[in-house]
Image (cartoon, grey):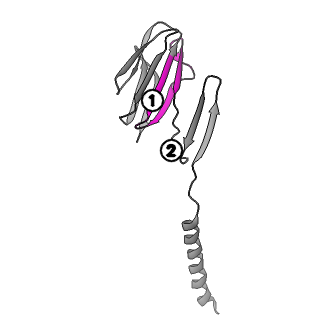
Amino acid sequence: MGYRKTLPILLASAVVLVIGFLLLKPKDETSSATTTSASNATTTTTATATVPQYKNPETIVIKNGEPVGGMAKLTYKQGSTVKLTVTTDGAETDVHIHGYDIEEATAPGAPAKFSFVAKDTGRFEVELHPSTQIAQLDVVP
């Protein structure tokens, strides 16, 4: 066979191999990871690498009026239950979750405890009154 006859056959074979590979390629598997800390144990399941990890419950510790470790970024799936505890070493104050309009008092030895269904999607501030943002709450579909 000549060069002009074999080139189209080689190209057609390459296209068939690429399409076959793409069709037969295994799909992403669900993976699980377990993280344990001194204060609590959390199990996180992720369907794919692009899906956020959902943590439950969360604890934010306030020392000298600021969240330890900086502002927390919390992500929950719509319809899941948000469980959040805020402890403080300072004067009595309130913790407010904007958008959901939920507010709880906190004081040393008396943490603010939240438990609610994440019905509304969006990004919501969690604020230590009068005006310190301590967390960002993202609720995704």
Residue 51 in the image: x percent, y percent?
Answer: 50, 44
Q: What secondary structure is found at the residue carrying circle 1? A: strand
Residue 60 in the image: x percent, y percent?
Answer: 52, 21
Q: Which residue is mark 1?
A: 82
- Residue at 65%, 23% (x, y): give it: 38
Q: Quadrant of the C terminus?
A: top left
Q: Residue type at mark 1?
A: Val
Instruction: State the CA–CA distance, disc 1 to disc 2.
Output: 18 Å
Q: Which residue is mark 2?
A: 51
Q: Is residue 45 left or right of residue 75?
A: right
- Residue at 49%, 14% (x, y): give it: 111
Give the mark, 1 or 2, whose residue is nearer the N terminus.
2
In this orientation, which residue lies closer to the viewer: 13 or 49? 49
Instruction: Kindly report the secondary structure that dominates the magenta region of the rendered protein.
Output: strand
Residue 128 in the image: x percent, y percent?
Answer: 44, 17
Q: Which residues are magenta?
A: 57-86
